[in-house]
Image (cartoon, grey):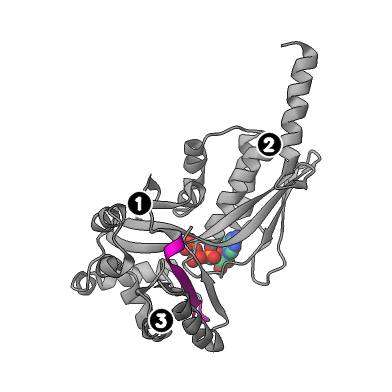
Amino acid sequence: MTSAGAKFESLHKEMLLRYRNGVLFMNEITVDAFAKVNLALEVMGLREDGYHEVLMLMQQLVLKDRVTVRRLGGSERCVKIVCEKEGVPLDETNLAWRAAMLMLDMAESLESVEVEIEKNIPMAAGLAGGSSDAAATIKAMNEVFELNLDEESLCNLAGGLGADVPFCVLGGTAVASGIGTDLVSTVGFAPQEYYVLLCKPPVGVSTREVYKAFDAKVEEIRKQPRPDVPYLVGGIVLGSPVRLLKGRMVNDLEYITSTEVPDINDIKAVMLEEGAAHAMMTGSGPTVFGIFEEKEGAVAAFKRLSQKYEETYITTFR
Ligand code: ATP
């Protein structure tokens, strides 16, 4: 290629990079960071290194944060987190901060970056908000620094930040095994057929504590209804609706968290009274999600629950 040709190509690439979704950016990119729920979560056992083996069916929701990464230039590497929402850490404890640093390492760059988070996903909720912000940061950094890393490489990097981060990079619907980082994409429920109502009681739960309590009660939990990820995957592929599969849509951790947070059972009861095809807890909780076939039922449950619980949202599968 002639030098004029190469210059044109690089200019064209830069223009493409700067012109996204009809908005002109200067060295910055905004990436959606979607929430997730677990349609099933089975704790398989405890590994010698203290991690739990799990088998989960993960599903992204349309509810999302938005993460904007800006290159600030300079030669004193620094990551600045900007977020208006109270309670979001602005220091190195923010997973997006760690993601940005990791990608600066990959880029062998000494530049500074700003990561602005528009926070909509409830926090400490079992909805992978922090993990999703980190995944969006990884993707944005890959673009603004033109690293051209493929999805598999990004997922591998993401695994170093947290068990849910690779899924947030991959997105959609996936079976997660191992410690949650071994992923296979699969078919999900048709998004247009369901409304998903999220309701988070006003408490945060510690995932670590929930797993600790799980280990102490493992025999008891094995006697409860069991999640069945392979059955669910087969059922969804064959087009079975939620109401026929709900018996296998179980979260092993719900038994633990709902003992500590009785609101979980109250919220489920309201959702089922208003016609939800199914209602269950996501992750280690405490958020409950109800799956409705009819909008009226979702709206009726929203009206009742939002009077008591500030963090109540209607969304859909993605
Ligand atoms: P998961 O489902 O992956 O367990 P979660 O929804 O339960 O995640 P997060 O919203 O990720 O939990 O937040 C858990 C804690 O992590 C928060 O209390 C907060 O201190 C910290 N945190 C770190 N980074 C973020 C972030 N980008 N957004 C929100 N919280 C964050």
Secondary structure beneath label 2: loop
Please tell me the numbered disc located at residue 145: 2
Q: How far across and how far down the image is residue 208, in percent? A: 42, 66
Task: Give the magenta part as a residue range.
Answer: 192-203
Who is closer to the viewer here, 231 or 169?
A: 231
For residue 21, side relative to residue 59 (left or right):
right
Location of residue 233 by image quarter: bottom left
Location of mark 3 (residue): 271
Q: CA distance from mark 1 to mark 2?
A: 31 Å
For residue 34, side relative to residue 53 (left or right):
right
> Residue at horizontal 50%, vertical 36%?
153
Q: CA distance from mark 3 to mark 1?
A: 26 Å
Please tell me the numbered disc located at residue 311: none
Q: CA distance from mark 3 to mark 2?
A: 45 Å
The quarter of the rendered structure image containing the N terminus is top right
> Residue at horizontal 58%, vertical 82%?
310
Location of mark 1 (residue): 175
Q: Is residue 194 magenta?
A: yes
Who is closer to the viewer here, 107 or 243?
A: 243
Who is closer to the viewer here, 70 or 90?
A: 70
Q: Amino acid at mark 1?
A: Val
